[in-house]
Amino acid sequence: MSRVLIAGASGFIGQNLLERLELDENLSIVALSRQKVSVTHERLEWKQADLFSLKDITAAMEGCDQVIYLVHSMLPSASLVQGKFYDLDLILADNFARAAKIHKVQHILYLGGLLPEDRSHLSWHLKSRQEVEKILKDAAPVVTVLRAGMVLGSSGSSFVMMKRLVQKLPIMVCPSWTDTPAQTIDLHDLTSVLRECLINISVQGKTWDVGGKEILTYRQLMELTAEIFHKHVYFMRINLFSPRISRFWVSLITRAPKALVYPLIESLTHPMLVRPENRFPVESLMNTSIRTSIERIVLIDAQPVHAFRPTVRSGEPKSARSVQRLTLPAGKDATWVAEEYFRWLPMFFSFIIKTKVVGNFCYFYFIHPKIVLLILEKSTERSTPERQLLYVRGGLLSLNEGRARLEFREVMNKKFIMAGIHDFRPALPWRVYKYTQAIVHLIVMKAFGVHLKLKDA
């Protein structure tokens, strides 16, 4: 019996995939979630894991021979997040890849996005999907990549945004990007393809494009959706609105989070089409028509959209995450970067802030050694030359609780160094922290990034 781990199991596609895989008696499933979930099936085990924690994902992956990666990080994962979504995605994928290598996982299955033929000006949303592919392809002997466009399902974020526009607007202004052709795929068809990749060895280890047989523009999709939902909408073609302007009113009308809407809208200028030579070979699994897909959605009661939900629960302790992608100087590693950071920081602050290293501890103090602002302890067990991990152990600026940590990790074959602070809980009142310490940290890391570029020159 194959033991399959699903990262992103609580999401829109993950939940539907679980229902499909539970019917297969030859599979046992490990489903990951940030929150505790009760077990609903004898061959299904839910495990609580924070994918920003390499320790968590490594523990959860133990005993699995196949793993599925359905994760995309566009929404805030902490009360305050400093960093681009594509940098957060890079860390999540890197953690997953490192855990897969540790456990010698045999097969990784990744669901990414369709890519246009011309990739010279990709949106960051699509660039991020491509980066995740590269990270995962080096993590297991067999890696299968599926690339899909819009998924037609009752709680899929892209379709729900389109449906809400049709339902709420009697007149739809259609910018030029709505004439971009797209090739969608039915949710049930997609979960069938994912299952096929787990059980059919002949389709594994390749990159496949998946999609239905029909090609419609986004405007045609909205017109069809309006017809099926019996909405009388006047569609007016206009060249005035760019994707940057469009994303504002799409977020306003649909009430979808800006962090989700903005990257998606910027990707709509690219044709999302299946390349014939890369089409998934079991075509019988992708025969559902677009009309049938949407008509099926009409019959289903509206479900909460997982991607619209806040990822941070109200009442949880306030925490911060800050991630920056920095240039890694040629010939250097994460160990050098961490040591250089502690050497450079006192020079940046002149005489105001000093550092003192004693054994595995680093102390940041204000003018006098007795005024300790922050204490970091290097984890000798978990630090390696390509990843340095330091835990926050106290100081005037931090609550000495939880798993607060600073890390420097190499990614993309030593091209970049990711500097990240995770699960940090400040001692200052939250509003004071947000507009003082947090801003100072961001300024410091950007300045350190400039310093590393100069070292690489």
Image (cartoon, helix red, strand yellow):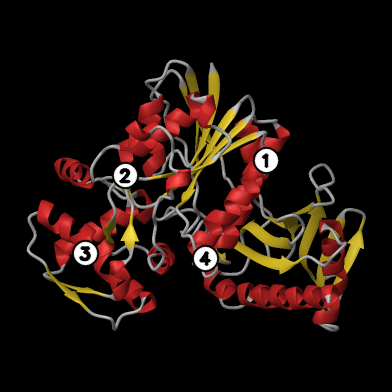
Give the mark toward the camera: 1 or 3: 1
Answer few, some or many: residues within 10 Å of disc 3's Cα (few below 14, many 20 plus, some between 14 and 19).
many
The residue under label 1 is 139
Q: CA distance from mark 3 to mark 4?
A: 24 Å
| Marked residue nearer the N-terminal end (2 or 4) | 4
| Marked residue nearer the N-terminal end (1 or 3) | 1
User: Which amino acid is tagged 3?
Assistant: Leu
Residue 226: mark in rendering? none
Residue 212: mark in rendering? 2
Residue 124: mark in rendering? 4
On screen, 163 above or below 123? Answer: above
Lateral position of residue 158 relative to residue 5, left or right: left
- Disc tally is 4
Answer few, some or many: residues within 10 Å of disc 1's Cα (few below 14, many 20 plus, some between 14 and 19).
many
At 52% from the left edge and 58% from the top edge, which residue is drawn? 78
User: Which amino acid is tagged 2?
Assistant: Gly
| Marked residue nearer the N-terminal end (3 or 4) | 4
On screen, 226 above or below 354? Answer: above
On screen, 106 above or below 368? Answer: above
Q: CA distance from mark 1 to mark 3?
A: 41 Å
Q: CA distance from mark 2 to mark 4?
A: 25 Å
| Residue 28 appears in the rendering | yes
* Mark 4 residue element: helix
* Foreground residue among 139 and 410: 139
Q: CA distance from mark 1 to mark 2?
A: 30 Å
Q: CA distance from mark 3 to mark 2?
A: 23 Å
Give the mark toward the camera: 3 or 4: 4
Residue 165: mark in rendering? 3
